[in-house]
Image: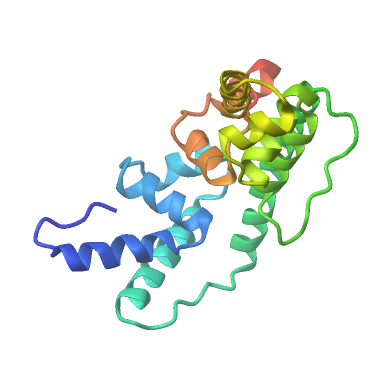
């Protein structure tokens, strides 16, 4: 949501902080409507969800923002349709991630944790799937928090080799699947093809 020009720096910071604490789906839907200026029907079409859910997401997001700015505890709506839609969106995102995993050569099914961040699960899987010359410096750097010199000493390779291997790891991660929130934003910013095209061509299927 655009910040009014008369808003003070302190209030703007409070607003941005409140916005960051919104649930993912209502936050993304609100951004698509307020920042990208998409009408409810178009958001529903791009995300493949019901228009009523878009309305509920915007109303919930605005209500939670007002509560947080007033110093009250925000409450989520207990709408069955909204919760069911969020579950379906998360499952679609997991299907999208599993497509990446298969492309990486991962055969075994992904063990999605109910309360874990799916992006963390995918990051761990990508680390595990790296070839050993890349996996070892990556784990030493990201998990063990070792410096470049320490990794160089541990693996008995040059500091330059460590940098090159970490750069390769980062390059592979950049080409990996988007987080749930970024995936939703990606869907929202890509106009959906007309329904008749979806039904006649498998090439037009959305993630």
Give the camera-side residue of 120 and 75.
120
Looking at the image, which residue sits at the far right? 108
Task: Classify the position of the C terminus by image quarter.
Answer: top right
Above/below status of 142 relative to 166? below
Whether residue 167 can be seen here: yes
Q: Position of residue 165 (x, y in %)?
A: 63, 22
Above/below status of 154 relative to 83? above
Above/below status of 135 relative to 58? above
Q: How is the image coloured?
A: rainbow
Above/below status of 105 relative to 89? above
Looking at the image, which residue sits at the far left? 6
Q: Position of residue 104 (x, y in %)?
A: 77, 23
Residue at figure coordinates x 45%, y 49% from the top left: 28
Give the camera-side residue of 53 and 148.
148
Question: Is 132 displayed left or right of 73 in the figure?
Answer: right
- Numbered disc total: 0
Residue at figure coordinates x 52%, y 35% from the top left: 187
Residue at figure coordinates x 38%, y 83% from the top left: 72
Give the camera-side residue of 120 and 205.
120
Residue at figure coordinates x 53%, y 25% from the top left: 194
Whether residue 201 can be seen here: no
Q: Position of residue 169 (x, y in %)?
A: 63, 26
Q: Quadrant of residue 62?
A: bottom left
Q: Position of residue 90 (x, y in %)?
A: 66, 49
Give the camera-side residue of 47 and 175.
175
């Amino acid at each position: 949501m655009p910040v009014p020009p008369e808003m003070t720096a302190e209030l703007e910071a409070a607003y941005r902080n409140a916005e960051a604490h919104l649930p993912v789906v209502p936050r993304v839907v609100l951004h698509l409507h307020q920042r990208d200026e998409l009408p409810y029907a178009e958001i529903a079409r791009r995300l493949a969800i019901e228009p009523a859910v878009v309305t509920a997401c915007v109303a919930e997001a605005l209500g939670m923002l007002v509560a947080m700015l007033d110093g009250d505890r925000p409450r989520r709506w207990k709408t069955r349709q909204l919760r069911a839609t969020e579950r379906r969106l998360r499952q679609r995102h997991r299907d999208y991630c599993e497509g990446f995993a298969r492309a990486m050569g991962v055969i075994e099914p992904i063990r999605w944790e109910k309360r874990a961040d799916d992006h963390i699960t995918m990051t761990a899987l990508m680390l595990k799937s790296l070839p050993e010359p890349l996996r070892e410096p990556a784990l030493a750097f990201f998990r063990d928090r070792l410096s470049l010199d320490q990794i160089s000493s541990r693996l008995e390779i040059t500091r330059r080799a460590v940098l090159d291997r970490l750069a390769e790891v980062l390059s592979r991660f950049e080409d990996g699947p988007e987080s749930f929130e970024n995936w939703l934003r990606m869907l929202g910013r890509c106009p959906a093809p007309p329904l008749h095209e979806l039904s006649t061509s498998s090439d037009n299927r959305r993630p």
